[in-house]
Amino acid sequence: MKLKILAPKDQLLQKINTHTAVVGVIGLGYVGLPFAVEKARVGFRVIGIEQNPMRAEKVNRGQNYISDVNDEDLRALVNKGLLSAVVDFSTVPEMDIIVICVPTPLTKNLTPDLQYVEKVTREVARRLRPGQLISLESTTYPGTTEEVMLPLLETSGLKVEEDFFLVHSPERVDPGNRRYTTRNTSKVVGGIGPNSLEVGVTFYSQTVTKVVPVSSARAAELVKVFENTFRAVNIALVNELAMLCDRMELNVWEVLDAAFTKPFGIMPFYPGPGVGGHCIPIDPHYLEWKAKELNFNTHFIALAGEINRRMPEFVRQKALRILNRLGIPSSRAQILVLGMAYKKDIADHRESPALEIIRLLRKDGARVLYHDDLVPFINDRDLKMASVPLTEKVLRESDLVIIVTDHSHIDYNRVVETARHVLDTRNATRHVKDNRERITLL
């Protein structure tokens, strides 16, 4: 009796369901490492491809560098041989599933920069074999998986839906969020075809509580850029309200807090010094660019980006007004920026509004320092700075303290008590009772 030879799809499904599939994760950053750990925890052997040799070495030593990953979990998985990292693509043929988590930045002209996606796809294509699933998790414009990746992968001579399978499943990572993690955040999956979708849904269902299949990879790509565009537009609305309240001499935080007591028809969003991170400042421009390719102008998205990019300049203007009121020329002022990370309680300063605020104030001649325990150094183009200790001396010698990131561990009562004046762009001083005359809110 002849043994039945399973088709590539059935072989792969069998490996996934028995957790004998080898999972490859390309890019062990804020998305890739938590994902790799989650897959290894349920018994998959995971190989990370990380071209930063320092990161790869840390993973292989069981040393964590991502706040959303548990140190002990990482160490235990490495010791069990379930998680390892390499710096090249030689292990691709061993992998049954290849998950791509690489950056998708913008060019200086705010157009998509897919160089990392394209480079990785070419490397995978050179080593592609039958029975592999490739999943792109990087945020991108609708059409990337089908129009950019698929042709590159098929240079291998293999055919999608028959020999290999291709899906887009956008990452949904919120750094520092302890409630929603990789496991309990629902996962959208869109395939190039029905076979790819079936394999992709089966794979993600092994570790994610709820998987949401959609009709195509293009639909999945649009889901992600819409999610972040939704946030960008609403943040822009409250940022514009903050600038209007400044003209009207009203407290925007009081107005918003009162508005958000309504139990229906409204959702809380708050203003700030600008938007940062790897999503909101970037992703809407991917959708805007794609729309222009189709001769469609996304007015809302463009306007939201314009308003949000204007906020560091608004903070600068407000700081100069405060210094003028205090009788201090900006050229003689020392300003302390409190918080460098783009978001509270995380160590990531990518696209942080603090960077632009510092550049603007330096152009005005001010001496600018910053304090952030979570971001001890910055090296961003022309800015090379180290965090200063938050001492009584630094606070007293600063003519103005600008709270840009509202880290939870900062004693804001002490800051207000000691500083000459505080410009609070995050309402971090909301519970400070004394010396309120020293506080100016955004």
Image (cartoon, helix red, strand yellow):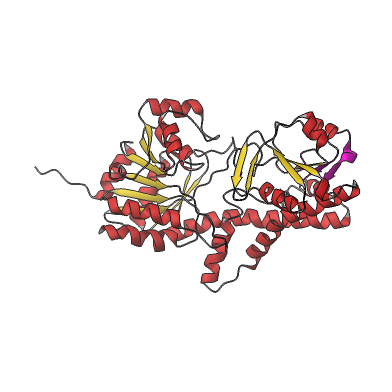
On the image, the x and y values in percent for residue 391 come to: 76, 29
Asked if residue 440 lies in the magenta stretch, the reply is yes
On the image, the x and y values in percent for residue 323 come to: 86, 48
Q: Left or right? Give the position of 12 relative to 365.
A: left
Is residue 54 visible to us here? Answer: yes
Residue under the image location 54 percent in, 44 percent down: 173
Front residue of this view, candidates 128 and 341: 341
Is residue 412 visible to us here? Answer: no
Q: Left or right? Give the position of 377 relative to 237.
A: left
Asked if residue 185 lies in the magenta stretch, the reply is no
Which quarter of the image is occupied by the N terminus?
Answer: top left
Q: Left or right? Give the position of 318 relative to 190.
A: right
Relative to 100, is 371 above or below?
above
Residue under the image location 62 percent in, 35 percent down: 376
Relative to 345, is 103 above or below?
below
| Magenta stretch, residue numbers | 421-442
On the image, the x and y values in percent for residue 338 come to: 73, 39
On the image, the x and y values in percent for residue 421 come to: 85, 40
Residue under the image location 42 percent in, 38 percent down: 53
